[in-house]
Amino acid sequence: MRVLFTTLASPSHGRAQLPLARALAAAGHDVLVATTPALASVFARDDVRVAVPVTVLTPQSFVTPELVEQATRPGRGSGEQQDVLVSLLPRIVSGPMARKLWEEILPVAREFGPDLVLRDGMDLGSCLIAERLGIPQLSTPSGTSNLIDPARVLPGLNDLRKELGLACQQDPLSLVPHGHIDYVPPAFSFARHLPPSWAYRQTLSVDRGSVLPRWIAQLPTDRPLVFAALGTALPRIRELTSDDGHERPSLPVPDPAVTLRSMIEAVSRLEECTVLVATSGTRPTPTACRRTCTRPNTKRAL
């Protein structure tokens, strides 16, 4: 079987796919990953082929005055940053971003001839590619597939279907007609709008040569261990949506430092536990650090 993965946005999206790609390759299937140049290294040490047809994707590059105006119309929400972002994302990923991915990935898919597409959650272009090729597609874990309501991307996808000569769909869950794959059991899923997953796969041992630092073994073992992580996506998106020399409306992405401060303030209230906070290189405010470090619990930032 030939399996095409598509991987976008953040290294964490590729790491979530990697155990599944490894398992398929180990079972003798032909695996090709279509990704961006920046993410190709995630798969470099594994027995999968990698193509880099996708140019650097920044949400900022798809924001237009028209999209911002639609997202901030009266009745669309409070106008707060989070509301605008939630309104903008469905329009971006089902409109200009899906069209761009269609154009860049379709030639690779036609040459490879996949039997199955396992796509990044942000890649709605490959939904239409699978429809054109007449093959199944499933989404793999990523933040966007957890967040976006399929009903909000259906109109944009149907506009593209009309443009590309594909049949329009009436069911919002036509976005995942064959289901989706998660990295946690259905009872713990972060997917707000999708049906229960067919299967889940934990992202264990992504880096086969990695080891924990020595000080981990010195942590107390007589109390619960709490791990709080900022992740890689938010700092990366913030970096990619910063000023790139083009004048266009900005994408209202949350500030990682503010998010990190909220996390630290929350875990600082926990009692009788050990808390590890992974910052992904983001520096919390001094106030948040002082609050955490002065609590009687064991806490450490990574």
Image (cartoon, grey):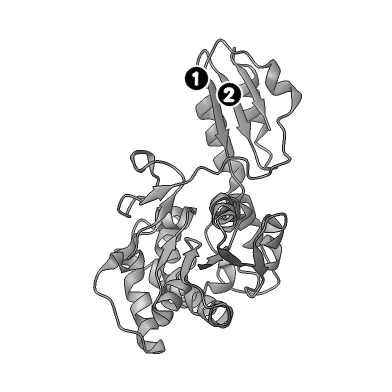
Sequence-first disc among 2 and 1 = 1
Q: Residue at the location (49% across, 54% down)?
A: 142
| Amino acid at circle 2 | Val
Asked if residue 41 is positioned above or below residue 34 in the image, the reply reads: above
Tell me, yes or no, whether the two marked residues, 2 and 1, touch with CB atoms within 8 Å.
Answer: yes
One can see residue 4 in this view: yes
Asked if residue 292 is positioned above or below residue 105 in the image, the reply reads: above
Q: Residue 127: image x %, image y %?
A: 42, 72
Number of the label disc, if any, that sits on residue 275: 2
Residue extending farthest to the front is 28
Q: How far apart are marks 2 and 1 (CA)?
A: 9 Å
| Quarter residue 229 falls in | top right
Residue 36 appears left or right of 165: right
Q: Which of the two residues, 229 or 72, is positioned nearer the viewer here? A: 229
Q: What element carries label 1?
A: loop
| Quarter residue 154 falls in | bottom left
Q: Which of the two residues, 13 or 202, is positioned nearer the viewer here? A: 202
Per the image, the residue denoted by label 1 is: 270
Look at discs 2 and 1 and give the one toward the viewer: 2
